[in-house]
């Protein structure tokens, strides 16, 4: 439970790559003995960040970069896209969509599942940083 592990993944900006990333993230958290409920929050929020990078921040041939750092007390995910023509930096001050909406909850999920969240520009793209404290 005391070793710090860092893992970097680059995936094509296509939702087909999500299953592999989800499995790698879950396995890394298991290896570090993170509790199930906290691991589920990390995987859910992380997958939302990656999906947003694919759908809103990447062109078809782009790569999405994912950096994962896990130790005994903290998990940090960084998800970076390369930007999409005409897209803007999302705000952390987001309102929930109407109940009838079928989309638009990804950022809210990330904010509610993580302990800390940051969105920052990276060149033409965006980097989302999510941090999670270990909970017993």
Image (cartoon, rainbow, N blue to C red):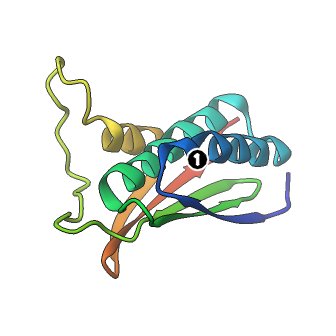
Front in this rendered view, residue 49 or 85: 85
113 to 124, vertically: above or below: above
Residue 41 in sight in this render: yes
Q: How many marks?
A: 1
Q: Residue at x 65, y 39 (%)?
A: 135
Q: Is residue 69 left or right of residue 48?
A: right
124 to 95, vertically: above or below: below
Could you tell me which secondary element the residue under label 1 belongs to? helix
Give x and y (percent) for residue 136.
Answer: 70, 35
Q: Residues within 10 Å of mark 1 (few under 14, many from 20)?
A: some
Q: Residue furthest front?
A: 61
85 to 56, vertically: above or below: below
Front in this rendered view, residue 82 or 44: 82
Front in this rendered view, residue 72 or 57: 57
Q: Residue furthest top?
A: 100
Q: Report which quarter residue 26 is drawn in.
A: top right
Q: Is residue 92 left or right of residue 67?
A: left
Residue carrying label 1: 17
Give x and y (percent) for residue 64.
Answer: 50, 63
Residue 115 in sight in this render: no
Give x and y (percent) for residue 8.
Answer: 67, 66
Give x and y (percent) for residue 19.
Answer: 62, 39
Q: Residue at x 16, y 39 (%)?
A: 95
Q: Residue at x 34, y 63 (%)?
A: 119
Q: Residue at x 63, y 41 (%)?
A: 22
Q: Report which quarter residue 48 is drawn in.
A: top left
């Amino acid at each position: 439970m005391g070793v710090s592990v860092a893992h970097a993944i680059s995936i094509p900006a296509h939702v087909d790559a999500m299953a592999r990333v989800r499995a790698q993230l879950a396995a890394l958290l298991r290896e570090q003995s993170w509790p199930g409920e906290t691991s589920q929050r990390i995987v859910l929020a992380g997958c939302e960040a990656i999906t947003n990078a694919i759908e809103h921040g990447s062109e078809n041939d782009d790569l999405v970069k994912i950096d994962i750092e896990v130790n005994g007390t903290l998990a940090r995910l960084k998800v970076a896209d390369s930007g999409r023509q005409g897209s803007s930096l999302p705000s952390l001050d987001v309102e929930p969509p109407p109940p009838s909406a079928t989309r638009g909850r990804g950022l809210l999920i990330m904010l509610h599942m993580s302990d800390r969240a940051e969105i920052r520009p990276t060149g033409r793209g965006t980097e989302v940083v999510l941090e999670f404290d270990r909970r017993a």
